[in-house]
Structures are given as C-alpha cells and as structure tokens.
Image (tube, coloured by chain):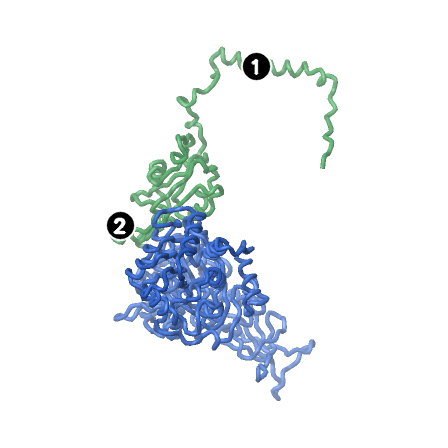
Amino acid sequence: MAYTVRRPNLTFWEKLYLPNIVAGLAITFNHLKKMLKGETHVVMQYPEEKWDAHLPEYYRGAPTLVTDEHGRERCVSCQLCEFICPPRAIKITPGSLPSDSQFAKVEKAPEAFDIDMSRCIYCGLCEEVCPEQAIYLRKDYAVTGESRADMVHHKDKLYELGGTMPGLVHKWNPDK
Amino acid sequence: MSTEVQLLNVQIDGVWLQFPKGTKVIDACQQAGKFIPRYCYHPKLSVPGNCRMCLIEMGMPKMTPDRKPVLGPDGKPEIGWIPRPQISCAQDVAEGMGVRTDSPMVKECRQGVMEFLLINHPLDCPICDQAGECRLQEFSVEYGNAESRFLERKVKKPKNVELGPRVTLDAERCVLCSRCIRFMKEVAHDDVLGFVDRGGFSTIACHPEKTLESNYSLNTVDICPVGALTSTDFRFKMRVWFLKETKSIDVNDGLGCNILIGSREGHIYRITPRENNDVNGNWIPDSHRLNFKYLQDGTRLLHPSVGSQQTTWPEAIAAAHSQLKTAGKLAMVVSARLTNEELYLAKRLASALNITLHDILPRVGEPDGILIPADRNPNTAGARLLGTTTETPGAHLKDILTGVRNGTITGILSLGEDLLECGFTHDDLAKLKTLVATSILPNATTAAAHVVLPGAAFAEKRGSIININGRLQRLNKALEPAGQCRDDWEILGDLLSAAGQSHALHSIEDVFRSMSQDVPAFEGLNLGKIGDLGLQLLTKPEAAKPLATA
C-alpha cells in the first residue's frame, strides 16, 4: 500500500544550506592541510600495498584445509560443511584411508574436496560446524581466476593455503 | 474375527486407555503417543530385555483383602506403584495397570543407562556411516547427559572387521543389543553371530569357522540401532542426511519387496527395505538391494539408434514404425519386468500392428523359503491379467521360435527382453527381416536389432506392478532417466501414434485411466489410490498360477 513520506520541517538555515557547504569545505581543507604536512596518504596503492597487516584476528577470508603437527589431514570428510554451506560451494567426495597408513585409525579422509570460490560467501559456517577443526577461514581474500574452473579450489590448493595448524584437539590419538 | 479380543484398561501418564490383551507395554505407550526409547526391542524379533533403555515406572491396582481393586474418588482403581523401574518391552499390559513414562525416576533411569552405554563409545560420529540415523545420537540428545563423567581409559575393541562379504563390524560402537544375533537366528535361520567375552569386553563376533554371508545379512545393518554394523557397499559413500528417499518397489522377483531408494543428485547410493507387513515385513534380500549398480556403471544404452547409428527419437520412432509395417508377419516378446501401464500399451500396440503371437519370458528360480519366490519376474500376474501372456507364461515362445526358424515369422518386436534368453541363437536373430528392441542394457538382441529404443529403469519411472500374491504396488521415480532414455510408456505411445492409433495419453496417469476403462480389474483405481503400501487387487490363487519351467 502506498503511503506518504513526511518531509522533515527544515529551519531557515537548513533551507539556505550554506552552513553545510562551509562545514564540508572545512573537512576538505583539514585533509589538504594534513596531506601537505605529510601526515596522511591520498590513496592506498592496491595491490602493491595491502591492508593485510591491519586485518583483525577474526577476519574471514578464503576457507582452507589444515593439517596437524603430524602431517595428518584433519578433515575426515564428514560432509557437515557441505551440508551447512548456504551457497552450496563445497563438494566432497569421501574416501577411506588405506589400512597400512599410519593414521589408519581415522579410517576416512576426503578423496576430493572442492570449494567453488565464485560461490563462497565467506560466512564461516563451515569453520563453525567442523567437528574436526579441519577447515579455517584464513586471510586470503584476493581470489582470482580467468574461468569458472579456475575459481574452484581443489584439495591441493586448500591445503597449500591452510598449511599446518598445531596445538588443536588431538582426538584420534591411538591411545584414546 | 471369530473371537473378541479382550480390551484391558491401562493408565498411561494419568490417562486411562484401552489396549487389546497381549499388547506389550512399550507398544501400548507408543500407541498412546508416548515414545519409549529402545535399542534391543524390535517388534519382529524376540524380546531379550538387555539394553535397559525402555525402563518405565509401573504399578498394579491396589487390592482389598478379598482381591477387589480399591477404587479411588474418581471411580478408577487406585494404583500401587512399584518402587523399582521395569522394562516395558518384556511386559504385557494388564487390567488396571499404571505406567509412568516421564516421571523423575524414569528420566533418571534413562540418563543412567545412556551414561553407561556411552562409557566406552568412541568419538566416531564424523566418520560413522550411521550418523544422522543413529539411535545413540538421538537418545543421547533427548534423554542423556550432555557431559561424560568418565575419566578412565576407554576399552579398546576391534574396529573395521569384515564379518562377511557385505557387512563391516566396529565393535567399539556396539551397544550389545543383540538384534543382529536374533535376526540371524530367528529370521535368516543362519545362526552365525553371538557374544564373546564378558563385562566391558563383551563383543559381537561371528562363528570362527563361518562368515556372515547369508543373503539377508544386510538387514542386520538396517536394524543395528548404532553404527556397529555398516554396509561394506555403502561404507563412506555418502552421509545419510543427503539422501532423498523415494518409496518404491523392488523388481528382482515376484514378491516386490517395498523399498526406499536413497539417491542424491541423480545417483543411487543405497536401497533399504521399507516396512510392509503384507509383503516383506521389514526385510529384503541382499542380492536384491545391491542390484542397482547396472543403472549407473556406464554400460547403459543412452541413445536411440537405427542400424547401430545414433539418432534422434522422432527418427527412431519413424524408422521403427516403417520397419514394423513392412516386416510381414510379426511376433512380440514382452518382458514381465514391465509395469502394468507398459504391458497395457504393448497389448494395444500388438492389436494395432496385427500381432497375434506374443508372450513373456518366464523366469523361474529356486525359492529360498524366506522372501524370494520361484517367480523371478516382478509382474507375471500383471502380464497375465493384461493378456500379454496366457495361463502358462512362455508357452508361445516356442511357437515364435519355430515360426522364425521356418520363415513364417519375419519380424520381432522385443520389449525389454534379450531373445537369446528365450532360446534364440545369433543365427535366428540374423535371419529376421525386422528386429525392433527396447532395452535398458545392451545385449545380443540390441546388437542385432535394426532399431534400438532405450527405456527407463525401475528407479526412473512411475507405474504399477502386481506381485505373486495379487497385490497391486506402485513404483516411484527417484531419478531422471539416464541420457536420452525415455519411459517405456512414452515409447509405446509414440509407436501407437505412428501406427495411426490416435490417443490422448500424455502422462502415466492418462495411461492408467485408459487402462482402468479397458480392464475391469483396475476399475475405479488410479496411481494415487494404490498408496505406498499397495492394495490387494487379485485373490492369491488367481495371481499365483503355476509357471511353466523355462
């Protein structure tokens, strides 16, 4: 249903709008003064210059997979991230670990793990839902590619971005 | 009913209800809407009462010295509550019995039982195939403690043990409910499983000189309430919460076990039995449930072809029609694996093409005494009812073969059958002037056929079939047909149009409607009315007339 928006009642000085122009120019001149003194830059020279050093701890960049300090891939392909992913960017093909593997107790590992970065919305639900602390949103945000296929991060790329994360829960300890 | 079943008054959580004599308390509570958690109790198996999960508080009416119930102010018997909990699975309802399913004592009991069950349970959920349909997960959330107080080391048990060719055991996950042991003993009649060792070390094991290789072994996986027994075939293939479950019917034999097809994104991952006490109970043979691989192993016929050249559907239909029209004397071999709707259209097509000689190929095997009957065709009764075969199925096959050999029959329309199985030789096939075949998989007949029309498999179509007991059951569509395959009723409808028979069959419902007008047995029915559990269409002796041996 259409309804009428009430316009604010402006005072005389507001209707004149000259004071606001003066206030705006004051900000501009302040910046000019700071720049002439060398206190500030005009612009950041991206991508040569980046904000990376200023990214906060909780920054949510590209999702990655991590290995533990023993070199074991933490992901056991439980597919909870695939289930929770709102844009359905994750696709996992589960596989099993060979019985002669040193991590045979875990039994299961992903055969393929693809994240379509052209779909990912960096929401972090995959990290939150992971029962194995295997997927983390790291600080990579400049994900580029020349085709849709380029935008899919396969398992190798995900482990390359994620690297090793020591000190997490060690629940597949053979003594446990 | 000749004898009236006595109804007993039972109080469940303060409400007086009536149940027939012989009802178990656990079932009575469930019927009253109070679900009682259970691991070992299964309605189709004996009652061992060993999981202790179904504990309830129970009472019997207080009695005066002259054995009359003491009545309370409301006129109902006063109940004297037993101070200890009872297991509800091993207790039948009795007159004046009282049951409490959510009293503080019952809640505490369930919590205690859950805590004990989880003491040695591994933290396997992320790799366990049962996750998502695991009673231990469900009851832990609903009735258990959030935290474990157990600080000691967990007991180690064998993991990833092959109990048999199709079943994998993880003893650490087992809650020792003994359902699998009882199933193998009581239903499969192959008593190979049992408990070994004692106390916390007790585990399920197979007889040392035997393996769990019964053709019903995978049913133990279905009834296992936890992830101890898992299907080796389904192991690590897909998490169950992704599977779309389609209610359908097994087509490997004349019984037509009710099944659930678990599929995701056009791929079948598993088939599980669906309860239907008039057909298969809760069970299905392993050989039947695993027989879906051929649909997706890359061997399917995916394109219509004319003279082994791939072509389009309109061209293939036109070619098939012109070949059939000019073939001379025709015969038709129909598969009893087709649905009623397809058989009905096949019969109509036969009369449109003046085919008088037609029959099905009977498949007879040894019945296994449990579920698998002698008739291995899913729809022999339907073929008989719709007139594509006679009282003795397969009787005309010999006539067709003789006709081909002496040259009186020059063309064959084969609907879903390999003629080599019907006694033909490669030379016989080469002799034919016209051979038009519909099929799912390539075989000698499709190789020799002049026109090949690929049809849809059982999981890719809707339709109805009649089992050996005369029960009309419904197939449902779980997947889209592979490649360019089409529903057989569409192919037959197109051939019918090409033969100059105008019809208004645009959907499977239209075909059924047309069939119900022409065949009195189907009068007043439609696919919706068949329902998930099917309905009795023919009497048993009508449906199960003897088969000629092939």
- Quadrant position of the N terminus of chain B in the picture: bottom right
Q: Position of residue A143 (x, y in %)?
A: 41, 31
Question: Which residue was labeled with disc 1?
Answer: A28
Placement of B5 over or under B162, stated as above or below: below
The kind of residue tagged 2 is Gln
- Quadrant position of the C terminus of chain B in the picture: bottom left
Question: Which residue was labeled with disc 2?
Answer: A102
Chain of the residue on which disc 1 is drawn:
A
Q: Secondary structure at mark 1?
A: helix
On the question of residue B537 being in view, the answer is yes
User: To which quarter of the image does residue B547 belong?
Assistant: bottom left
On the question of residue B123 being in view, the answer is no
Q: Secondary structure at mark 2?
A: loop
Q: Position of residue B273 (x, y in %)?
A: 44, 64
Mark 1, Cα crowd under 10 Å, few <14 / some 14-19 / many 20+, is: few
Between B283 and A167, the one lying in front of the other is B283
Left or right, residue B417 beside residue B43: left
Question: Mark 1 or mark 2: which comes first in sequence?
Answer: 1
